[in-house]
Amino acid sequence: MLTQAQQLLKQYYGYSSFRPGQEQIIRSILAGRDTLGIMPTGGGKSICYQVPALLHQGLTLVVSPLISLMKDQVDALGALGIPAASINSTLTGTEVGRTLRDAENGRLRLLYVAPERLESEWFRERVRELNVAMVAVDEAHCVSQWGHDFRPSYTAIAPFLRSLPKRPIVAAFTATATPEVKHDIAGLLELERPEIVITGFARDNLGLHILRGENKRDYITRYVQAHTHQPGIIYAATRREVEDVYEMLRKKGVAVGKYHAGMTDDERSAAQEAFLYDDIRVMVATNAFGMGIDKSNVRYVIHHNMPKNMEAYYQEAGRAGRDGEPGECILLFGAQDILTQKFFIEQSQLSPERKSNEYKKLQSMVDFCYTPKCLRSAILQYFGDVEGEEPCGTCSSCKDDRETVDITIEAQKIFSCIKRMRERFGISTVAGVLKGSAAKKILEYRFNELPTYGVMRNQTEKEIADLINVLVAEGYLGLSEGQYPTVKLQEGALEVLQGRVSVYQKVSRKPLAVSVGDD
Ligand code: ADP
Ligand code: ZN
């Protein structure tokens, strides 16, 4: 079967081989198993159900959330000579009738439908007459309230499947890999012992860099001026920051555009067009920019601020180098970014449970910004894509040639101080005590009487706080959830306090920087 699938891949699409994840997913589907494929955008999900659709006896029904996506897919399939059609709200009753007759007569391989259709008893009645071999669910995270775009009509999919005379193979696809979402997809779509394939998060043409302590504006100006002939995106956390960075670059004479939700629809589509057609080189934008735009030759993505979680980071950074050519992803981290994201979570209308979940995801993002590990490996680990755990050799961690220094003594001072403060305070208060600060809160709690008060007075409070963050990222310390998290000792910290384990950190005299003039 797989060799046949390979022939079809060559014959219809002109590709000589499947990507590793595609092969595994297709193998699973062809073996008749329900399958959940988790792949980033651009990973090649469509082929995973389109090729099996060509091999199955019956029809493949594709549930897809956006009319524009459906239309693109049906057109693309038509151009490849694969008979496909869609049923959506833009069609007249006559057109729907004709499409269903085509399906009944076996004239279609794939039929795309909006999830709302599945709620219609009339439609379900008609589909029972068809020989449905497989149901492919695109953007399957829409079924989960934990996902970022919950679509109530996705909950109609499971009852729809039950209503069919013979249960088809179900293949679900998404780019969201969090445990809650995975669990919901498998449960709410009633997948039967699904094979879960997570793949494609290793984009080895992307150079990943995290820079802490840079002057963000200076860095961006230098970088953009050194790459004037290359398209790039700069993401900032707020409209205000987008405006500021945009103005700064415009005044330097850069061909720059901006994009955020505070602009009119016309202004936004004009900016998007200008970027797509290379009239402007650099787009400064909030995370509102990017959904559904496909510009393959973006050479760099700079994050002016840390995004809210790893999913958002990966999606945004992943807009670089879609054409397979090298792309650079640079995250300019500042401790203020954590406060901004916490503010957004607090301001949101989310339930306490959801908020706590957002805080957890934010913490993973912060850990990523502080990790000394290979950034690509850290991403693969986060998304559960275990292949390629080798260090990439190109990210800011791998390229970090700073000295490894034994910081066991510092770590012991920090852990001991946290213990004496009964693990009830946040990073900045702990740093203040170690520094020997006379802040009101510190004197009120009489922390100035602790033996650890001022034991790190030779360092700045910021340096101490950074060190604590490194120890959090390394798993020696944990942070409680909520807006004002308190630092707690983890098991590893006790080992360090007892002198059984040493702690190392990379340090350099000058801050690590991606050279900005090397293209
Ligand atoms: P997704 O739906 O996951 O966002 P697509 O299915 O649109 O991704 O695929 C992204 C791009 O990768 C498309 O241009 C597609 O033709 C290409 N592609 C997919 N599979 C392969 C393959 N095996 N070899 C080469 N290119 C592929
Ligand atoms: Zn690396």
Image (cartoon, rainbow, N blue to C red):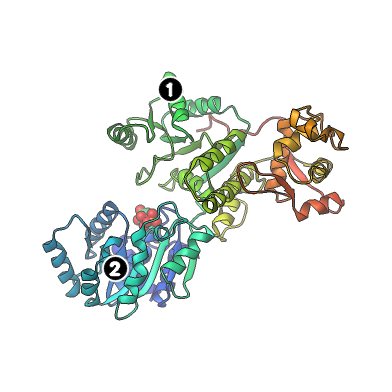
* First of labels 2, 1 by sequence position: 2
* Res. 377 visible in picture: yes
Mark 2 is on which residue type? Leu
Q: For the residue carrying disc 2, how many other residues have a C-alpha within 10 Å: few (<14), some (14-19), or many (20+)? A: many
> Which one is in front, 403 or 116?
116
Q: Quadrant of residue 295?
A: top left
Q: Quadrant of residue 192?
A: bottom left
Residue 138 point in image, percent of width and height: 36, 60
Numbered tag placed on residue 247 in the rendering? 1
Question: Is residue 341 depicted above or below 91 in this figure?
Answer: above
User: Which residue corresponds to the image point at 81% horizontal and 53% vertical from the top-left?
Assistant: 494
> Which one is in front, 183 or 501?
183
* Mark 1: secondary structure: helix
Q: Evaluate if marks 2 and 1 touch, with contact meaning CB atoms under 8 Å apart.
A: no
> Which one is in front, 312 or 6?
312
Q: Quadrant of the N terminus?
A: bottom left
Residue farthest along the front direction in this orientation: 444
User: Which residue corresponds to the image point at 43% horizontal and 72% vertical from the top-left?
Assistant: 191
In this figure, which residue is indicated by the disc labeled 2? 61
* Res. 402 visible in picture: no
Q: Is residue 449 left or right of residue 403?
A: right
Residue 202 point in image, percent of width and height: 52, 54
Mark 1 is on which residue type? Glu
User: Which residue corresponds to the image point at 48% horizontal and 60% vertical from the top-left?
Assistant: 181
Residue 204 point in image, percent of width and height: 52, 50
Q: CA distance from mark 2 to mark 1?
A: 48 Å
Q: For the residue carrying disc 1, how many other residues have a C-alpha within 10 Å: few (<14), some (14-19), or many (20+)? A: some
Q: Is residue 292 left or right of residue 92?
A: right
* Mark 2: secondary structure: strand
